[in-house]
């Protein structure tokens, strides 16, 4: 399989300029290293009708090209089930019947990191399990043998984060993101993962799961997010933050692309032109503030 990078949006709404900037970076990382670039629609959760088509349209408008067909996670239930069966056969999963509330209220295990699953259902005996099964459907959790794991990131260096008994399949039957992402990246030959740095904290869980599934760890680059002038994550309420809204405010897509490229220290122009100057080690490491106000006069 040809080595590849990817962009994997959740089709919950239109992409905003922060998502587009991350997609551009993922494209630049992949193309500058001779990789293919793939798109995967992460529609297991949070899908809104029509959003996928809007997202693909906006990615193309900003100059992103991709190889092969777009993969959709809702088409891949069988593959996720197989991966979970393999882990179960190896004794690496267990059923969990806890509600969110029960987890919040449970005393945390000694020395457990904050937010980690307290292990309530880890050692149920078969009678307890039978009783709980009759009351509510089970989620499937990983039986983790570690409490933390270290990954290497191109921009962050070594990063150690929590690995608890995280959920692989929710109790409504939906595959959890952490399982799907690992299985899909492997199946698509993706050996480079470039995404927003809000996902860095989940990466040790994913890399540990990859290890258990005998999947090589990809190269990771977690890139800074775009924020509003209050330093908060960019959202719809920040005004014209999508290509559609910007166009309505009189800002053409080429200007948005140029502005995003300049925010990365790259010259304005096409993405192909930007490839020539792209150097991962020279990328800005801080969040970037979207100039929300005064857009009617064009971008600064
Ligand atoms: N679907 C995730 C999101 O839109 C991204 C997952 C990933 O890149 O691994 O936040």
Image (cartoon, rainbow, N blue to C red):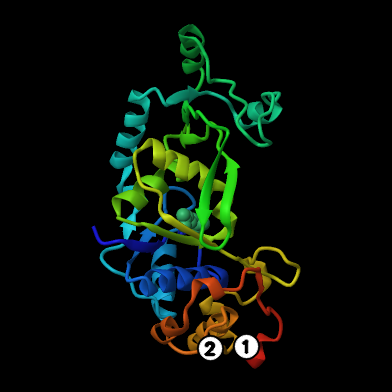
Q: Where is residue 163 in the image (x, y as percent from the top left)?
A: 55, 37
Q: In which quarter of the image is residue 286?
A: bottom right
**What element does badge 1 sit on?**
loop
Q: Residue 81 carries which label?
A: none
Q: Which residue does the numbered mark 1 point to in the structure image? A: 299
Would residue 251 be found to the left or right of residue 8 on screen? right
Q: Which residue does the numbered mark 2 point to in the structure image? A: 255
Do tag 2 and tag 1 residues touch (Cβ < 8 Å)? yes
Would residue 101 be found to the left or right of residue 131 on screen? right
213 w.r.t. 74: above or below: above
Q: Residue at (30%, 55%) from the top-left corner?
A: 189
Q: Residue at (31%, 46%) from the top-left corner?
A: 76
Q: Separation of disc 2 and disc 1 at Cα? A: 7 Å
Q: Residue at (49%, 85%) from the top-left corner?
A: 253
Q: Position of residue 65 (x, y in %)?
A: 34, 75
Q: Earlier in the sequence, mark 2 or mark 1?
A: 2
40 w.r.t. 300: above or below: above
Q: Position of residue 144 (x, y in %)?
A: 50, 30
135 w.r.t. 29: above or below: above
Q: Residue at (35%, 44%) from the top-left corner?
A: 215
Question: Which residue in the rendered view is the most extreme toward the right?
Answer: 230
Q: Name the quarter where the N terminus is drawn.
A: bottom left
Label 2 crowd (10 A; few <14 / some 14-19 / many >=20): some
**What element does badge 2 sit on?**
helix
């Amino acid at each position: 399989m040809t080595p590849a990078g990817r962009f994997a949006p959740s089709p919950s709404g239109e992409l905003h300029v922060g998502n587009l900037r991350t997609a551009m970076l993922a494209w630049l990382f992949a193309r500058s290293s001779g990789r293919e670039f793939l798109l995967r629609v992460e529609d297991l959760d949070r899908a809104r009708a029509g959003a996928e088509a809007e997202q693909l349209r906006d990615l193309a408008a900003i100059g992103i090209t991709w190889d092969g067909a777009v993969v959709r996670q809702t088409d891949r239930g069988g593959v996720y089930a197989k991966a979970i069966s393999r882990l179960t056969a190896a004794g690496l999963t267990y059923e969990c019947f806890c509600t969110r509330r029960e987890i919040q209220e449970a005393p945390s295990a000694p020395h457990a990191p904050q937010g980690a699953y307290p292990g309530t259902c880890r050692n149920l005996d078969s009678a307890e399990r039978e009783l709980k099964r009759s009351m509510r459907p089970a989620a499937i959790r990983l039986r983790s043998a570690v409490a933390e794991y270290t990954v290497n990131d191109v921009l962050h260096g070594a990063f150690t984060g929590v690995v608890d008994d995280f959920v692989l399949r929710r109790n409504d039957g939906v595959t959890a993101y952490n399982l799907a992402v690992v299985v899909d990246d492997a199946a698509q030959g993706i050996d480079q993962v470039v995404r927003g740095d809000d996902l860095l904290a989940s990466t040790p869980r994913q890399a540990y799961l990859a290890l258990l599934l005998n999947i090589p760890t990809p190269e990771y680059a977690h890139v800074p997010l775009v924020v509003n002038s209050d330093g908060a994550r960019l959202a719809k309420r920040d005004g014209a933050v999508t290509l559609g809204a910007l166009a309505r405010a009189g800002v053409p897509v080429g200007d948005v692309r140029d502005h995003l490229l300049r925010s990365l220290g790259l010259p304005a122009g096409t993405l192909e032109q930007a490839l020539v100057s792209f150097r991962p080690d020279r990328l800005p490491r801080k969040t970037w503030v979207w100039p929300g106000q005064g857009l009617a006069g064009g971008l600064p």
